[in-house]
Amino acid sequence: QVQMLQSGAEVRKPGSSVRVSCQTSGDSHSSYTISWVRQAPGQGLEWMGRVIPIFGVADYAQRFQGRITITADKSTSTAYMEISSLRSDDTAVYYCARGGGAYAYWGQGTQVTVSS
Amino acid sequence: ELVLTQSPGTLSLSPGERATLSCRASRSITTNYLAWYQQKPGQAPRLLVYGGSTRATGIPDRFSGSGSGTDFTLTIGRLEPEDFAVYYCQQYDTSPYTFGQGTKLEIK
């Protein structure tokens, strides 16, 4: 059974950066795309970007270009999402999800709080 | 980017009734790469339908997806108490893989 385990909650100050990890287990296929989706308090889902581990290629939503980096370590089946220059409106739950489009498997979510 | 608009924003129905949720795209999704998710408070989204009309594994057959081009629909045949949640559509035809703003299905 596929499981995606994310790192724990983070609190950061404005202007700093944060890295969230997502480890996949229960599946031998490392070729799946890993995507990141966030949800601000009381808001909807926002697609941020994705990485294709076997190629090491990432693709980002325009609004995050230059501010996020999504990477993957095939050897540990772990994907990472780092976001820099944090602002208060980056406060959200960040989810990883597996797949090239429709996401059947999700991490449990990581709360990132940006506050001075 | 491809914008998805869901309607209504909130739908108030009673258990046993039929629910019809709409998702309209700003341009045609020729591949039918359109998914529907259910989300309950404090939980990650749950995939219900992909490819516009294919139910995901383990999803009850009261959930059905339909549509093509720019107009897609999620129908819940007879509402069960556990179906009251927020529903999102998502297109995965063109990056960025955008979501609709959601429809809240609440108990009347």
Image: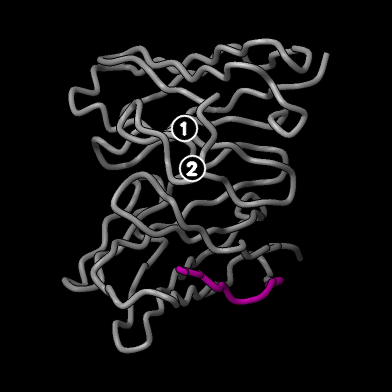
Asked whether A63 or A51 is in front, the reply is A51
Please tell me whether residue B79 is drawn above or below residue A82 in the rendered image: above
According to the picture, the residue beneath numbered tag 2 turns out to be B47
Does the magenta segment cover residue B14?
no
Q: Position of residue A102 (x, y in %)?
A: 37, 44
Q: Which mark is residue B36?
A: 1
User: Tag 1: residue type?
Assistant: Trp
Q: Residue at x 19, y 73 (%)?
A: A54
Q: Could you tell me which secondary element the residue under label 2 belongs to?
A: strand
Check contact, mark 2 vs mark 1: CB within 8 A. yes
Q: Residue at x 61, y 13 (%)?
A: B19
In this rendering, would A101 be left or right of B20? Answer: left
The answer to whether dots 2 and 1 both sit on one chain is yes
User: Tag 2: residue type?
Assistant: Leu
Q: Quadrant of the C terminus of chain A?
A: bottom right
Q: Earlier in the sequence, mark 2 or mark 1?
A: 1
Asked whether B16 or B85 is in front, the reply is B16
Q: Residues within 10 Å of mark 2 (few under 14, many from 20)?
A: many
Mark 2–mark 1 Cα distance, whole angstroms, equals 6 Å
Q: Which residues are magenta?
A: A1-11
Q: Position of residue A81 (x, y in %)?
A: 44, 69
Q: Residue at x 32, y 82 (%)?
A: A73
Q: Residue at x 50, y 28 (%)?
A: B61
Q: Position of residue B32 (x, y in %)?
A: 25, 26
In this rendering, would A56 be left or right of A115? Answer: left
In this rendering, would A38 be left or right of B30? Answer: right
